[in-house]
Amino acid sequence: MQQLKSMHSQGYKEKELTTALVRIVNNRKDENIPIEQILNEAGITRPPVITIYDMVEVRALVLYALGIDSYGAELREALIYFIAAAPVFRWSELRYGCSDPEQAIAAILHELKYIGQVIEIGGEQEYVWSSRWVSVRTIRKTLATRARIGNPAFFKYLNYKPGGN
């Protein structure tokens, strides 16, 4: 019962944070700056507290609430096309262009025989997805030789540290 209360509390805090961030983004939409920069300036920043995964998910929740980069009924098809272009990928790369709920995305990826795992790549712990039959060595090699999917504003957002940018 205590765990259920804790989960409910976490969900409430997440919704409250998302609502506050959406309000901040909406209040600054006339400034013509990337949403990522607004989130950084609102306090969504990297170490020591927030991981890349957390940064990606906060951004996805805000974009989803704003109706940006959401596929809805076409999510499965969009994921199949994404996988065709990048059979091995970082979670952050997928979330760059897809803000649909994390559980819906993961469920479809599991149906497609994909697994997610945390792997160290370039000194950073990365949450990556691949076919369940791909080795960790192949995942590392593939991601090391391919340019990251995203744009400069997204990369700056993921690596933002207050006072350092």
Image: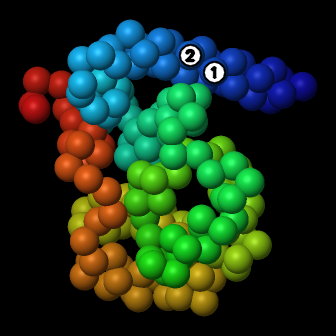
The x, y position of residue 97, in whole percent, is 45, 53
Q: Is residue 69 above or below residue 131?
A: above
Q: Is residue 43 visible?
A: no
Q: Is residue 136 visible?
A: yes
Horizontally, is 25 left or right of 11 in the view? left
The x, y position of residue 10, in whole percent, is 66, 24
Horizontally, is 43 left or right of 6 in the view? left
Q: Residue at x 48, y 66 (%)?
A: 128
Q: Is residue 123 above or below residue 54?
A: below
The amino acid sitting under disc 1 is Lys
Q: Residue 102 bears which disc, if any?
A: none
Q: Which residue carries the number 2 mark?
A: 19
Q: Residue at x 59, y 82 (%)?
A: 131
Frontmost residue, 13 versus 40: 40
* The N terminus - image quarter: top right
Frontmost residue, 136 versus 13: 13
What is the quadrant of residue 77 in the picture?
bottom right
Q: Is residue 139 above or below residue 151?
A: below
Q: Residue at x 25, y 71 (%)?
A: 147
User: Which label sits in the foreground, 2 or 1?
Assistant: 2
Q: What is the C-alpha distance between the residues marked 2 and 1?
A: 6 Å
> Label 1 near label 2: C-beta < 8 Å?
yes
The amino acid sitting under disc 2 is Thr
* The C terminus - image quarter: top left
Q: Which residue carries the number 1 mark?
A: 15
